[in-house]
Amino acid sequence: MRLKNELYHEEQLGIIKELIDILELKDKNSFILYELDHDEILKSKIMSLLPKIRTFYSMSKITAISTPERIKRPYISIIRHILKKDYDILSTEHTLKLEEKNIRTKRYLFIKK
């Protein structure tokens, strides 16, 4: 029996490209977690990829893909699992200043392998 990596290579590349386009990683190589958490449209675009991911990837044991309602931020897990093959993903502490208030969050930096 052939693996999904072999059978659906082109489809997987399409999903990776969609995710890169959604996150605009070609224009900027990072995003801030706080901004992603508060952008419902962006989160819904990422989560809308789930049916394709379930079809073309062998990731049924990953909670974010099999049962996303069980974890707090399934969209982050999806991003990390799909892009880890092509990118080194670094997470750093980041402080935003919004309305005289400091907000601690994370910045995810993507470095092409």
Image (tube, rainbow, N blue to C red):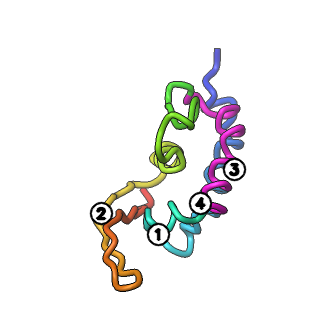
Q: Residue at x 56, y 70 (%)?
A: 26
First in sequence: mark 2 vs mark 3: 3
Amino acid type, label 4 = Ile
**Residue 29: assigned label:** 1
Farthest residue, direction bottom:
100
Q: Residues within 10 Å of mark 3 (few under 14, many from 20)?
A: few
The residue that disc 4 covers is 20
Magenta stretch, residue numbers: 40-59
Quadrant of the image containing the N terminus = top right
Q: Secondary structure at mark 4?
A: helix
Q: Residue at x 36, y 76 (%)?
A: 96
Gap in angstroms between the C-alphas marked 1 and 2 = 13 Å
First in sequence: mark 1 vs mark 2: 1
Q: Is residue 45 magenta?
A: yes
Q: Residue at x 56, y 37 (%)?
A: 68
The residue that disc 3 covers is 14
Amino acid type, label 1 = Asn
First in sequence: mark 4 vs mark 1: 4
Depth check, mark 1 against mark 2: the one in front is 2
Q: Secondary structure at mark 3?
A: helix
Q: Nearer the viewer, residue 80 or 9?
A: 80
Depth check, mark 3 against mark 4: the one in front is 4
The residue that disc 2 covers is 92
Residue 48 location in percent, x, y? 70, 48
Q: Residues within 10 Å of mark 2 (few under 14, many from 20)?
A: few
Gap in angstroms between the C-alphas marked 4 and 1 = 10 Å
